[in-house]
Amino acid sequence: MKGKKPYVVVFIIQAIYAAMFLLSKAAFDHGMNNFIFVFYRQAIATLFLLPFAFFFEWKTAPSLSFLTFCKIFFLSFFGITLSLDIYGIGLIYTSPTLAAAATNSLPVITFLLALLLRIEIFKISTSAGIAKLVGIVACVAGVTTLALYKGPPLEFLSHYHLSYHESNQLQTHESSSTWIKGCLLVLLSNSFFGLWLVLQSYVIKVYPSKLLFTTIQCFLSSIQSFVIAIAVERDMEQWKLCGNVRLLAVLYCGIVVTGLTYYLQTWVIEKKGPVFLAMSTPMALIMTIFSSALVLGVTIRLGSILGGIALILGLYSVLWGKSREQMPKASIDLERAPA
C-alpha cells in the first residue's frame, strides 16, 4: 500500500482541481464578481497559511531584503493576482471543461518561457528535441481547436435538468466571439502562471523558506486583488458572501486548493518528482468533463474533447523529451546499441 500512496495522492490533487473548476464556474454563474472572488480566495488562503508559516519556518527563515521583497511583490502580481483575475474572466466566457483542458498546456507554456529565458535547452537533432517540437505543435493545435472549433454537442453527456435561465446563460457564453475571447484569456492566464513557475526558481534560491514564501505571496496578492476589486466594483452588496455556492467556492479555493494542495504537491514531487505530478494533469480534465455535464448541466462539445486530447498528447510528448534529456548518456547509448 505504501508504494501506491503517490498514485492515490495525485488522484486527490486532480479531483481537488476538478472541483475548483466546477465551484468557480458555479459561483460566477450565481452572480459573484470574479475580482472579489480572487480577493476573498487569497485573503482566506493567507489566514490559513499564516499560523503554519510562523510555527514551522519563522525562526529559520532568512532575512527579507527590500530587493527580494520587490521581486516577490511583482511575482505575486503577475503570477497570482493577474493570472487568477484573467482566468476567472476566461472561465465566465467559456466552460470548466475548456479551463481544465487548457491546464494541460501549462507544462508546454512553461517550457517555452524557460526556453526564451535560456533556462531550457532545445536541440532539434536529438530524439528529445524532436519530442519537444512535436509537443509544442500538438499544444498549438489543441489551443487552436479549443478556440476556433466548438463542434456538435455530445448529447449523451448532457444533464437533462436544465432550466431556461441556465440554457440561456450557456448559449450567451458560447457565442463564437465570446468563446474565442475566453480561450485567449485562459491561455494568457496560463502564460502568466507559467512565467511565475519559471521566475520563482530564482527567488526561492535567495529566500528558501517555501511555506513562508508562499504565505507572503498570498498576502501580497490579497492586497493587490483588493485594490483591483474595489476599483472595479464599488457596490457593497456584491461584496457580501450571500448564498451557499459563493461561500463554499471561496472557502474551498482558499483553504483546500491553496492550502492542502500545496502540501500534497510538495509531498508528491519529493517522492516521485515533478514529471510524475505533471503526467497526472489529464485526470482533472476527465473528471471535469463528466462532472460539469452531470452537476452543472454544461453542454460538452466535440471541439473541447479534441482540443483536450491534442493538449494531452503535447503534454506527454514534452515530458517524454524532458525525461529523455535527463537520462544519463550511458543509458541512452546502451538503448541504441544493437542486440
Image (spheres, grey):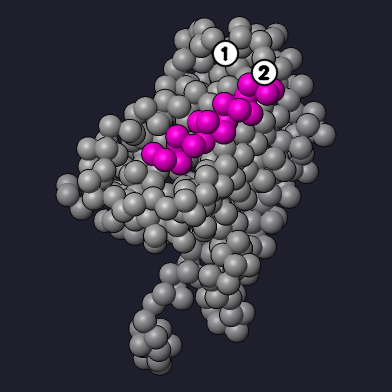
Give the answer, above or below, for where 81 lies relative to 67: above
Q: Can I make out residue 328 in this image?
A: yes
Residue at the extreme right: 177
Which residue: 40% across, 57% down? 204
Start-end of magenta stretch: 215-233
302 vs 126, left or right, is right
Residue 310's spot in the image, x, y percent? 62, 53
> Quick check: 123 above or below 45?
below
Residue 226 belongs to the span the image colors magenta:
yes
Q: Within 10 angstroms of label 1, few (less than 14), some, or many (20 or more) residues?
A: some
Mark number, residue 239 = 1
In the image, residue 75 lies in the stretch drawn in magenta = no
**As shown in the figure, which amino acid type bears the numbered disc 2?**
Glu
State whether residue 49 is above or below residue 28: below
Give residue 305's quadrant in the image.
top right
Which residue is found at the position 37% from the left and 27% from the top? 47
Instruction: Bin the neighbour count of mark 2 within 10 Å (Cα to Cα): few under 14, some 14-19, many 20 and up.
Output: some
Q: Is residue 333 shown above or below 324? A: below
Q: Is residue 32 left or right of residue 172?
A: left
**Residue where numbered disc 2 is placed:** 233
Q: Which residue is drawn at the image coordinates 41% and 74% (left, top)? A: 326
Rounded to the nearest whole Å, what is the CA distance between mark 2 and mark 1?
8 Å
Residue 158 x, y percent position in the rendering: 60, 23
Q: Is the residue under label 1 in contact with that under label 2 (CB below 8 Å)?
A: yes
Secondary structure category for the residue under label 2: loop
